[in-house]
Amino acid sequence: MTEQTGAHATTGTYLRIAAILVMITLIEVGVFYVPAFQSVLVPVLLVLSAVKFTLVVMFYMHLKFDNRFFAFLFGGPLLLGFAVVVSLLLIFYGAIRLRTGM
Amino acid sequence: MTHGSTHATSMGVDNRKMAFWAFIGSECLLFGSLIATYLVYKGRSLVGPYPHEILNIPFTSFSTFDLLMSSLAMVLALAAVQRGDMKQGKLWLFVTALLGLIFLGGQFWEFSHFVHEGLGLTTNLFGSTFYVLTGTHGAHVTVGVIWLLTLWIQALRGKLGPQNALTVEITGLYWHFVDVVWIVIFTVVYLIQ
C-alpha cells in the first residue's frame, strides 16, 4: 500500500521561502551591527526570528496545508513552552527585585 | 499490515504522523526549558569568558545559512520522492545530510575554539547553559544526519520509492524542527547578547 501525504506547496514556493529566509537572516545580522538599531535591537530580532520560525513551520513543515489537528498538537506545547520561558524569567527577575529592592 | 503502509486513525490522519507531531510538541517543552535556563542565567557569570568576548557572529551566520539551505534541500527531496523522481530524491537527501554534517563540523570547531579560549562546561554559568543548550541541539542534528543517511542508503539500494513518501515527510518534519530550534537559538544566544 502506498503511503499518503497531504497536498504541499510547489518547488517555486519552496525556493521563494528560502530566499525570504536568507534575506531575513541578512537583515538580522545587519541590524546586529548597526549602532542606530541598538535601542530596538531585541524587539526587532524577536519579530524577525518569529517570522522565520512561522515560515518554516507553515511551508516547509506543511502545517499550512495539513490537517488542523497537527497544528493543535504542535501549537499547544509550543505555547506551553513559551509560557514556561516567560514564567521562569518573571519569577527569577521578580525574586532578584525583591532581594535587592530595585 | 506491511511496512510502509498507511495507518489511518479514526480522525482520518496517519497515526505515525500524528505521533510524530506529538513528539515534536514534547521537544518544544524540552528546548523551551533549556532556553529558559539560558535566559535566566544570562549575564550572571562571575568570571569570563563572557558571550560578547567569544561568540563569532559571522561564523554562526554561515552555520544558520547552511541549516536554512538544508531545510530547502529537505523539501526538495520530499517533493522529488513524492513525484517518483528517485534520482533527484537521492541527490537532495544526500545534500541535506551533507549540509547537516557541515553544520556539525562548524559546531565542533566552535566548541574546540571556545575550550581553547578557556570556556569549559563548568567555567561559568554562560559556559554551562551555552554548552547544554547548543550541545542538545547538536545531538538532535547528529540524529537527523544519521536518519537522512539511512534513508539515502535505502534509496541507493532501491528500497525507497514514492510508496515511502510519508517516511521521508516524517524525517523532514524532524529536520525542519531542528532548523526552527536553531532559528530561535541564533537569535536568543548569538544576536541578543
Image (spheres, coloured by chain):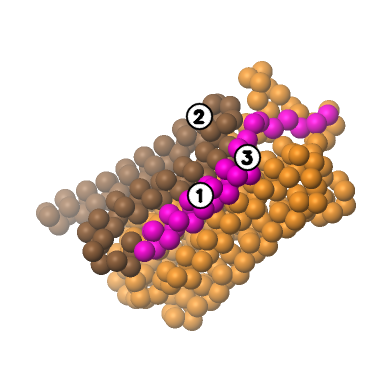
Q: Residue at x 60, y 44 (%)?
A: A12
Q: Which residue is label 3 attached to?
A: A10
Residue B154 seen in this snapshot: yes
How far apart marks 1 and 3 lie (CA) works out to 21 Å
Q: Residue at x 39, y 63 (%)?
A: A29
Identified by mark 1, the residue type is: Val
How far apart marks 2 and 1 lie (CA) works out to 17 Å
Is B28 above or below relative to A19? above
Q: Chain of mark 1?
A: B
Q: Which residue is label 1 attached to?
A: B180
Image coords of residue B186 (percent x, y): 44, 59
Looking at the rendered structure, whether the residues under marks 2 and 3 are on a common chain is answered as yes
Marker disc for residue A72: 2
Image coords of residue B166 (percent x, y): 72, 37
- For label 1, the SS is helix
Q: Is B155 in the magenta?
A: no
**Which chain, by letter, is orange?**
B
Q: Label 2 crowding class (10 Å Cα cut-off): few <14, some 14-19, many 20+?
A: some
Identified by mark 2, the residue type is: Phe
Q: Is A6 in the magenta?
A: yes
Residue B174 seen in this snapshot: no
Image coords of residue A38 (percent x, y): 25, 62
- Farthest front residue in view: A12
